Amino acid sequence: MQRTWVRELAGWMLALAVAVITVGTVASSARAELLFRDGDSLIVALLSRSLLGGGPQDWAMSSVLFLPETAVFAALHAVLPLDVDGLLAVNAVLDLLALYGALRLAAGRRREGAAPVAWSVAALGVFGVLAMTETSASRDALELASLPLTTTYYSATVIATVLVAGIVRRMLDHDRPNAMLLAALLTLGSISTLSNPLFIAWAVVPLGILLAVRAAPGRRAAPGARSPALTALAALAAGTAIGLASRIPISAWIANTGAGYAQPEQWRESLVYYGGLLGDRLDSPLGVLAAAITAGLLGWAVARGVRSHDPGSRFVAGAAWLAPLLVIVGAIALGTHAARYLQPLAFAPALALVAEPRVLRLAPGLRRRVTAVIAVVLVIGAGVSIPRVAAAASRPDADLACVTDWVEASDRTGAGQFWTVRLPKLHLDDPSRLVQVDHRLNGYAWLVNRTDLAASEVSFLVEDAQTVPWELPVSAIPDEVVDCGRYRIFDFGETLLPLGPAHS
């Protein structure tokens, strides 16, 4: 028992080292733009800060509500004396640690001839390697493994999908229904669906298919073998239904249900789009390496599923290849154009490594030495990476400071477009001093507290390279143009620009 406790603790420590190394590498690349500064990536930080600050809350959210992500970030914000970028970096490390916990659950219980801790660390390490091959600043690139490091791109849904696979595996490993696992599956399905309906596509559909196949009446199985599968399938379906129903009372916060994203008639354009992203990804050695790793994991998953006779192992191996396949086919069939929807292609194949975590056939002495060497390398790597994470999170941004200092000193209210204004808005003492608008100065109620749109007029505009050319409702010439590097502030002085009606 003591050795088991020590082994599990060692696994968490090594997973922490992998997480720090991964975040340090990604944050030191151009991908830091996505972690710390991208307009989409800041919704959880904006929402958490607003909730902690009190005051009226009338948010216009997408179909994703980011409930678990907001709870975690708000907790970090409440207890850690760090600025926003520091909190985002810590959050990225915690996301990877949570993913390790989910992988460890999916690896199953300790048993003779198995090494679930070692293989769980290995699975996280492989996922970390995939993330470290991703170096672009683009949110639209086919660089999927680094997206869960952000607070926005569905990290909770990634973790929940792997957790569901792990819970179901534990249910299949038990001879009789387990009330605790059943309650966990029901609760996780409810919260995940409530927060992000994409959970249905990533987890409920592929894992439900695997469970339905196992529970099929005509399937050859030992007496009672179908019972855990049926129980798990019922719990997953019930949790999903509860989650969908729970969205109704908070529908006022959901500005877009997501139904408009499905355009099946554009499946050909979608196929071309994703094919182009794949071509771009394969245009670099790191992209080729990532593709080779992913293909190897998918092949391993299929082989594990064919060879294994253990129901839990076969289920996890099936999830490793079926989830990516169904998500890719579904994304194209629905005519979508967003790489982030394909994230199961990055994280699900890692389940192949924990499907049947057998002890390697090495001499015990050699196995211990190899383990020790890997542990030392990871600890040293983490030690080197901690300053890299700190440097990335504390990198000065003179252009941003120029804007926020000017706005604070002006004691007036201005406006800017979505991709331009969200970063300065987050870093202001009072975010409502910058109103989010479109290029015609109509309020843009998207991923923002609609109480900010109460302002009827503004006296300055902030723009950068992402700003669409303005079409002002009145003729006005700025008294001054303030140069803030990549930003420009058009100060209209005493002239007030009226804001139009808000839309999402």
Image (cartoon, rainbow, N blue to C red):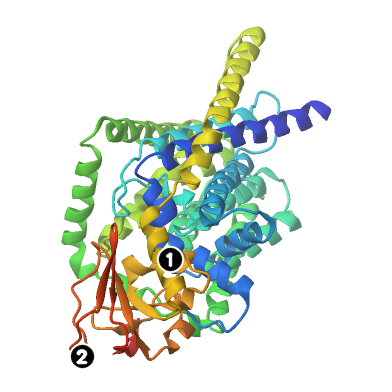
Residue underneath mark 2:
474
- Please name the residue shown 23% across and 79% down the image: 478
Specify the quadrant of the image occupied by residue 370. top right
Q: Is residue 286 visible?
A: yes
Residue underneath mark 1:
404
Position of residue 64 measured from the top left corner of the image (x, y, whole percent): 46, 69
Tell me the amino acid under the disc marked 1. Thr
Position of residue 236 measured from the top left corner of the image (x, y, whole percent): 58, 62
Q: Secondary structure at mark 2?
A: loop
Q: Residues within 10 Å of mark 1 (few under 14, many from 20)?
A: many
Position of residue 440 measured from the top left corner of the image (x, y, whole percent): 23, 83
Tell whether 138 sits left or right of 423.
Answer: left
Q: Is residue 215 visible?
A: no
Q: Secondary structure at mark 1?
A: helix
Label 1 – label 2 distance at C-alpha: 26 Å
Give the vertical position of 442 relative to 464 (above or below): below
